[in-house]
Amino acid sequence: MTTDGPRGSEATTEDLGSHRAAAAGRGSGHTLLYPTVVMREPMPEPPQRRRVSARLVITVWVASLMGLVLVLVNLVTWSALTSRTDERVDQALSQEIGEFEEFAAVGTDPETGNDFTDVGELMRVHLERQYPDDQEILFGWVDEPSAVPGGGSAPGTETDSGRFRQGSEPPLDLSADPEAAAQILNSPDARGTLDTEEGPVEWEKIRVHPPDGQDGSAGWFVIGYFTAEDRETVASTMATVTLVSLFGLVFAATAAWWVAGRILQPAQQVRQAAAQITEEDLTRRIDVTGGRDDIASLAEQFNSMLDRLEGAFTEQRRFVDDAGHELRTPITIVRGHLELMGDDPEERREVVRLVTDELDRMGRIVEDLLLLAKAQQPDFLHPATVSLAELTSDIDAKIRGLGDRDWRLEAIGDATWHLDPQRITQAMVQLAANAVRHTQPGGTISIGSTVHQGSALFWITDDGPGIPHAEHGRIFQRFSRGGTPRGERGAGLGLAIVRAIAEAHHGRVDLRSAPGSGSTFTLVVPDTTQSRREHV
């Protein structure tokens, strides 16, 4: 099988196959093949998904909900207007029928005081006293042979025999239309709807009989109501409401688009910033102005994350640069001695000693660099509540073996403190070793601890040559040895480690020194538990 791997990979595969074949041939007398396949294919690209703008989604949802609400409002409004129109028509029909029933129940002519003896006279007198609305029509019809709807001589005027109509002119005189009158009078229902050229008419009729004991023809009293005008009013109102609803929907969608854009602007900036951020450029930040909502908080958290990432990448680059810078020298020394090493046994022993010494120094540098890199991690400290007196006594006992000096314990703090005792011990031992390197045998080195203004203080004082004021800040930087012979064999990481331990405790390192007057390094550790209580 043929593969497309690099030439180096193919050579490795062939050599491995040859060794295996040779070993198999020696053991069994024949050759076995062990094919090795190296698959090197490009990584599949992630599927490109079609993404929809969150701004558009929000706008569509708001517009959809607004549209649904407006549809419901229009339906409810139309139903209410239609119901009110129907109620008004029903009330008008019932009212006219009720008034006629009351008048017929009295059965007396209001003008003469005589009882009615004829259905036609009853209807005529009642209609003369009525003032119907413009959309109403009132008429009566007496069952006479010459006036039966559909008969041979249907009346067509108000004076025709058997037909009585209101005095005012209605939109359409149904009583004068034989076909319309026939549909109403011959209908088996007491109420119905009739379509006319003036629009639908809601009508109601009541049968009228002659007074008791009187002979004569019966008849019908009819009330009609033209609903076209009311329906047109409802339609016009609904058209206005619908138009306003459409304008409201467009306005709501536009407002939703604008508001969504304002709200999602930090999220858009987060997306753009995330797309532009690279390992080489972590300086971009999102400008969060105003807003206190969740989106603004997201932008602030994103900025905080970028700060942490930038710090982590900076520490990584710093670690690589420092390691490359500081390890290059011992590697060069080792390589040079090995290249120049001769065959003389004594020379070889000397070279091995030098190489071993440089390798030990490289190991210490690597450990110090790893410690400084770890100082940025959250698990760098393991704090506990400890006694300052016990911790100071332990530190004093440990540092006395660093050199032949006049060690003095000046003060012991009488309190308990929340700190990492191992890291504090490490920092104090580093300061003590630094003091030993810069003092003569028999020189005085003092150690002490106390509590002052809410902070625990640990100090180391020596009577060495002192440090110029211009170098006070620089000596705490990595690989800085100052302008004096201090730290000739060191990598210049000791004081940087001390500062990292102090800053991990949210504290600092103070230096008081001057040329010829010695140096005092003070480790300041604030009470973090009190700070937490104040924040709570």
Image (cartoon, rainbow, N blue to C red):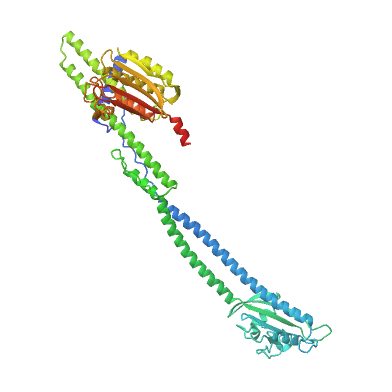
Residue 383 location, x and y as percent? 43, 25
Vertical comparison of 515 with 53: above or below:
above
Q: Does residue 219 appear anywhere in the picture?
A: yes
Residue 404 location, x and y as percent? 30, 12
Q: Toward which corner of the image does residue 431 lie, by quadrant?
A: top left
Residue 207 location, x and y as percent? 74, 79
> Residue, x 71% and y 90% (percent of image)?
161
State the count of labels: 0
Q: Nearer the viewer, residue 473 or 331?
A: 473
Q: Toward which corner of the image does residue 430 lie, by quadrant?
A: top left
Q: Nearer the viewer, residue 76 or 497?
A: 497
For residue 87, side relative to residue 478 (left or right): right
Q: Toward which corner of the image does residue 92 lie, by quadrant?
A: bottom right
Q: Nearer the viewer, residue 287 or 499?
A: 499
Q: Does residue 33 appear anywhere in the picture?
A: no
Kindly give the residue lying farthest to the right in the view shown. 213
Q: Quadrant of the N terminus?
A: top left
Kindly give the residue lying farthest to the top in the view shown. 345
Kindly give the residue lying farthest to the bottom in the view shown. 159
Residue 467 location, x and y as percent? 25, 25
